[in-house]
Image (cartoon, rainbow, N blue to C red):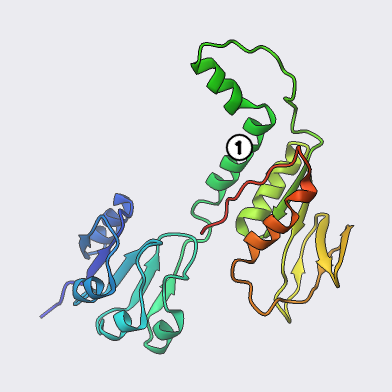
Amino acid sequence: MTVTPEVLLLENIHPAANEVFERHGYVVHTRSHALSEDELIEAVQGKTLLGVRSNTNVTEKVLGNAPDLLAVGAFCIGTNQIDLLAAAERGVAAFNAPYSNTRSVVELVIGEIIALARRLPEKTQKMHAGVWDKSAQGSHEVRGRTLGIVGYGNIGTQLGNVAEALGFRVILFLIVLSGLLYYVKKKVWARVGGEARDAGWDVVRGPVPESTSGGGVGVVHGHHEALGALGRTLPVERG
């Protein structure tokens, strides 16, 4: 007897995924929300594939109680919600969609920068209050401005490309894992040996902290004062 494979999709994954799976003979089960560990163990029974987003944790306990599971798909950027080691030990493939919203985030960041530079939030608030403020004082073009990017992954690199096309001077901060080289083509700002440098390096290597947990927040807060009164920080990280 042929067993029809089943897939469980959680957290309002786009209906297009349902159509693809059904077209390939899967029975699709959907939930609009994330599940707790015990709820997920119960729901994943008999399922061949599991699709999650950021709020469902696929733990070792879940994987150990899902004998039919072949793969877990994270319909989002990261895989930190999946116990990758436990999945590998059980032969369960785990994958993500690292480029799924890269361009969306880049355009959002550029839009926010322009809105801040042009003081649009302030002008909008006055307009809603019935004040027609025609003054351009304090409003500026973004061309020629300096954009610092903390982290230079998929989103950071594309943001740098788009920003340079608009006339920004792009500098960046990144931590390089020991034994790996991070090649970049842009000007790099990094802290090496306690000394801040701004140079056109092609390769950046530096000491790695014992823990990088929350490191991005520390970098932003630690250098916020150096931006001065006109500087702005836009938190656009995943977490």
- Tell me: residue 238, above or below residue 169: below
**Near-viewer residue (208 or 180):** 208
* Residue 170 appears in view: no
Q: Residues within 10 Å of mark 1 (few under 14, many from 20)?
A: some
Q: Quadrant of residue 89?
A: bottom left
* Residue 126 appears in view: yes
Q: Seen in the image, is 19 located left or right of residue 225?
A: left
Question: Mark 1 is on which residue type?
Answer: Glu
**Near-viewer residue (192 or 106):** 192
Query: The N terminus appears in which quarter of the rendering?
Result: bottom left
Q: Quadrant of residue 212?
A: bottom right
Q: How many marks?
A: 1
Which element is circle 1 on?
A: helix
**Near-viewer residue (69 or 27):** 69
Q: Residue at x 47, y 61 (%)?
A: 97
Residue 153, percent from left and from top: 64, 61
Can you identify the residue that label 1 sits on? 112
Q: Residue at x 66, y 48 (%)?
A: 159
Residue 176, percent from left and from top: 72, 72
Q: Seen in the image, is 227 located left or right of residue 154?
A: right
Q: Which residue in the rendered view is the most extreme toward the bottom?
A: 89
- Tell me: residue 4, above or below residue 99: below
Residue 13, percent from left and from top: 33, 55
Residue 6, percent from left and from top: 21, 69
